[in-house]
Image (cartoon, helix red, strand yellow):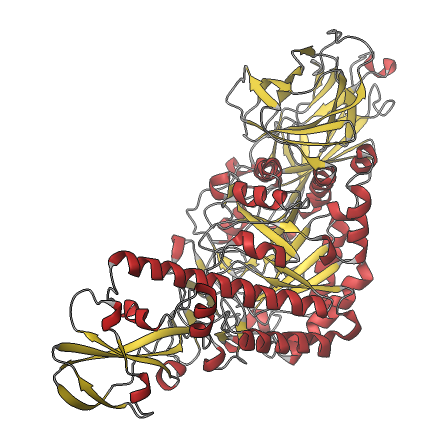
Amino acid sequence: MRPLLLFLLSILVLGGFAQPVRESLQKSRYGDPEVLFRHPPESAKPGALWMWMGTNINKAAITADLEALNKAGFSSTTVVPLADVVNPWGEIIGKSPTPEIISFTEPWWQMVRFAAQESRRLGMDFGITNVSGYETSGGPWITPELSMQEICYSGKRVTGNAHLSLVLDKPTVDPRSQMDFPVFNLATGLTEHPVIPGRKDYYKDIAVLAMPADGVVPKNEVVDLTSKMTADGHLEWDAPAGNWVIYRFGHTTMGALIQPAQPQAIGLECDKMSEEAVNFHLDHIIGEVKKYLGDLAGTSFTHLYFDSYEAGIPTWTPKMKEEFLKRRGYDLTPYLAIFAGRTINSTDDSIFFRYDFKRTVEDLYRDVYFATISKRLKAANLTFLSEPYGGPWKEAEVMPMVHQVMAEFWTGNGVYTPYITGPTIAALRKAGKNLIEAEAFTGQPADSKWSEYPAWLKPIRDAAFCAGINRIILHRFTLQPWDARYKPGNTMGQWGTHFDRTQTWWNAMPAMVDYWQRCQALLQWGNFASLNGDFATENIADGILVNNIHRNYGGTDIWFVANTTHNKGAALCSFAISGMQPELWDAVTGTMRPLHDFKQQDGRTIIPLLFDDAQSFFIVFRKKLATPAILVQDDFPFAHELLTIDGPWKVTFDSAWGGPAQPVTFTSLQDWTVSADSGIKFYSGTAIYERSFGLNGEDSVRRGERLFLYLGTVRHVAQVILNNKDLGTIWTAPWKVRIPSGLLKESGNELVIKVANVWANRLIGDEQQPADMEWLPNLYFYNSGRYLKEFPDWFLKNQPRPSKGRYTFTTWNYFDRNSPLVPSGLLGPVRVVREE
């Protein structure tokens, strides 16, 4: 995940999975698609990046989080240990209740072991990052000589035609870290690029070169004086006539630090081009895994995670001269002055050298960093999980070494926002890879501030499916370390999307995950089929956008077809297949039905499809067409309204979260935010709507026709219970549920609709009250709010909070008292309909 940049890439190598998933992949890819659709395999279950924020970790929370994920249908977690908040760099929250839990120290490893044990109990895969934070490989155990290196130099101008005896200054650099992001410095209390002692006291010479002082320097006029300089910088040289400059080249640590880690866990990034440094880092990490995980390593503890790269580009490594000569075939020494801004031989030659040097860096990242990690983790029976993009290497060259590659997509402005997805997935497919995984729904503050909800997310996810991603790993699921009074709870600072068990709509997650599983099962099945003309649309109505992806195997073809907008509309869809009976499989409801309204001509099947808001279908061709296609009936039935269920509605809110203490009567359905009652206006959570109704003698009940309950507009999820029968959770359009035959009565039907909205309104409502927590402003990116300065005393002492009108507790505050509210509640109209 990259909090500032969007990067992407991805796929799973089968050998990296725990045994149940590997077996599932092997058996399901060419299995019966109907069986897979009805009973998705283990490989179709999503995973989650599990953010452990600062020291706020305990065993009860670990168990509660894992059980919630397991119950919702997830199969894996990857722990990412971070600072208390991330904005995008790490900041601390003062007065931690558990200050002893510092990542990669013994108390933290004991929590990791417990999580691995709980994962084994639940049958889930589990892993961690290889570093504190998500960036990149290193820690306090990395010394300056094993860290990422940079070239530095000093220069002295001299006049020749004389014997020179002089001392060359040792090069010096800015003592502050050279890295993209600042860190919180415990020593100064500032977020800054800190002074790195190694940049003042660690230095190694590379070469001493003399050359004409000005202009383009012919290579044959570069004089190597390295052997003439003593260790203390003293040089004796008989200089030819002319004006010369003598450069002393060396290298020191970049001072690049891992981030955004807890300040107590920060350390240097290891040298990715040094086999010694990479092995030293892996010796430490693998050694700790073996020490604390024991027999869990390689079983329930399955992987180490290497996130997308943000550590910067080094310019040296101790063996660079030898490696450059071996790989490029010439000595780089005369060209070192290019790093001092000089031109050697010609502009073209200097550009050529820079290219060769860049290519050598890429080679070393491939042959040292990636190859060493791959080999070492395989020997330890651990999976190398990586997002191998954004760094100084060629992705196509390193991907074969990564056991399990992961892509990334964001929710930018409410649409699917990838990074170089197409070329990456194409390269992976060319390599014969099938399962493509991605860090999913990474959200910027403008898009994800406790205002996101399942229906909003659906077209984003469907666009990712159409791009080729067939297993999603949520970004993010944050460990919730406190009891149920403290919601929405812990956050990853300003970053969403807020997939947490404390979400108002978490109870809808199983229904949404069922959809993901059905989709991922079919999108992992068979083989990807080329998109070249195999699907087309025309007569597109009402501004919808129809995307697709095609899979096939053994005479069966399956298209996933998705409206990736929030508009309703229609399109005439043409599939490059004929002589087959089309079927429509709905992954939201799990239903399957043949289609009748289609025609076949010129080797294609043409089907008119109606799409609701962000609706998607699988169009399946698996059976020969028995008779020529004839239009016999409409595949999208007309809804004949039998009854509109008007008010009054009895609506019960939860007073523990600020709702009215007693049930209220809605004479008609309305948006909660327009209520004069502040307990309703600012309410977040679940409200229960109840209403009795009859059918006024309508005879459809006796005929047992196809009856549905339409809910109209819902903000944001709903569970429907009719005559004590749970009809399920509705989280996306079309907002309806099937009424089982015989359930409706002529009179005395009892309808219960449980509606949950988002957290934003209660958080805004709390801002109307006096403050009882201190906040610090986020002075950096997005101006997206404030983070908690310290845990308040009333929280630490388990006392009633001073501000009685406040209900929520969280570590990041996006809102003020004037922030706009989010429309909420059941808006209707609620209708009983017969589809015909």
**Residue shown at the point (29%, 89%) measured from the top left:** 229
- Residue 670's x, y, as percent? 57, 31
**203 horizontally vs 511: left or right:** left
- Residue 87's x, y, as percent? 45, 60
Q: Is residue 43 above or below residue 810?
A: above
Q: In this view, does 639 lie above or below 778?
A: above
**Residue shown at the point (52%, 78%) measured from the top left:** 264
**Residue shown at the point (78%, 35%) measured from the top left:** 37
Seen from the viewer's position, the closer of residues 327 and 301 is 327
**Residue shown at the point (46%, 53%) measured from the top left:** 814
Seen from the viewer's position, the closer of residues 672 and 244 is 244
Q: Is residue 462 above or below residue 81?
A: above
Quadrant including the C terminus: top right
Residue 82 makes an appearance in the image: no
- Residue 540's x, y, as percent? 54, 18
Residue 318 makes an appearance in the image: yes
Seen from the viewer's position, the closer of residues 494 and 127 is 127
